[in-house]
Image (cartoon, rainbow, N blue to C red):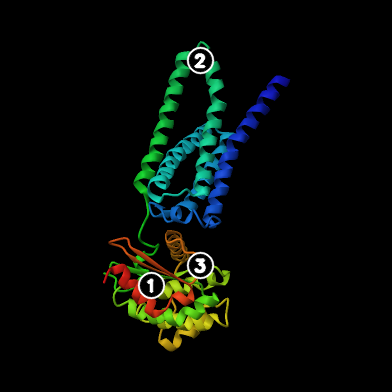
Amino acid sequence: METTVSAATGKSARGFWTMAPVAAAWVLSVLSWLGVCLDDCEAAHMYRLFGIPLPPFGVAYFAVCGLAWIAGRRFRFSGFLFLLLLSGALGSEIVFLRVQQRDIGQWCPLCVGIAVSVVAACALIARERWPGVAVQLRGDERNLVMKRLAGKTAWILIAFLAGMGISAAGLKKPDAFAAGLSAKSLVIGDTDSSLEVYIVTDWFCPSCRAAEPEILKGARQAMLQAKLVFVDYPIHTETLNYIPYNLSFMIREKEKYLQIREALAVLALKNREPMPEDIQKAVSPLGVKYVPLNYTDVLAGTQYFNTLIQKFKVPGTPTLVVLDSQTGKVKTLSGSSEITSDNILKALAEVSGK
């Protein structure tokens, strides 16, 4: 009797430890969804699985795994479904890691942690189930056990390959934001030019405020020959309050954007946490109506900004980067003393070779 109770207790404990890595994968997916990892994760977050952002997909998937594990304590088929779900996840994680290594060129700690958790869960299940199989193979029903094992192995392999195939087919890095908006939607100026100007500022940076008049003067001249993108770098956390508004105006009000930017800069001097009605009041004299973006578009825009900041290794604000996308030549200006309208035009001439 004691032996039976001990065996049951041991099996329950093993089952718990099998679920622990899955719970860890779910927690890491939640942290990824909340944007806890900002430096190395943003490029990975730009990817979608059939249009679905990866973090919420991971949260939902591992939640289903948890439900299958709980049901598996009572229903035998649910226990096998849990195994199939993990096999599919293992195939998917192999594809995700390959994309990070080959396409992104850097590792997202949270994504790697999720992959390790899935591998650990699969390893624990194999360790838990193999001894029981080995004992059964010594009995009289060897052929029956072998057939059952072969059938289950085939289903596991199918789930693994399906995870790889579905992920390989559906994993994309879209140029588009959620509502049909593209990264190109943030561009003002000459959209056909190979010259690109990225102006990185913080709405509450004193140096940025000092440089803003020269930035706007140079931007008006530069946009005649180059693409311009204004990038928000929230060194001061209050800048996060302005990013949704700034993104909306860059996308929807290109012709009046520089004027709108001036109005927002004035508002930022007296209001660190503006409400939509405050924004509307500030831009109404320009004949502009503020139309909010949805949350997913704001998140995608913020991630795009962070990707640019990492790509150009922006040291701080204000920073201006001039790039020729054809030759790859880059010129960077930093600080209010360097970023003048004359220097912006000189940088364009230097990079373009004209």
**Discs 2/1, front:** 1
| Dot 3 crowding, Cα within 10 Å, few <14, some 14–19, many 20+ | some
**Where does the N terminus fall, quadrant-wise?**
top right
| Dot 2 crowding, Cα within 10 Å, few <14, some 14–19, many 20+ | some
Q: Position of residue 165 (x, y in %)?
A: 36, 40
Residue at 41 percent across and 80 percent down: it is 216
Q: In the picture shown, does residue 64 fall above or below 140?
A: below
Q: In the picture shown, does residue 285 fall above or below 61?
A: below
Query: Dot 1 lies on which element?
Result: helix
The residues tagged by marks 3 and 1 sit, at their Cα atoms, a distance apart of: 25 Å
Q: In the picture shown, does residue 253 fall above or below 161?
A: below
Dot 2 or dot 1: first in sequence order is 2
Tag 1 residue: 251
Q: Position of residue 311 (x, y in %)?
A: 42, 59
Query: Dot 2 lies on which element?
Result: loop
Q: In the picture shown, does residue 28 fall above or below 119?
A: below
The residues tagged by marks 2 and 3 sit, at their Cα atoms, a distance apart of: 65 Å
**Discs 2/3, front:** 3
Residue type at mark 3?
Gly
Asked whether 43 or 114 is in front, the reply is 43
Residue type at mark 1?
Ile
Tag 2 residue: 137
Question: Do the CB atoms of the residues marked 2 and 3 lie less than 8 Å apart?
Answer: no
Labels in figure, total: 3
What label does residue 316 carry, if any?
3
**Where does the C terminus fall, quadrant-wise?**
bottom left
Question: Do the CB atoms of the residues marked 3 and 1 lie less than 8 Å apart?
Answer: no
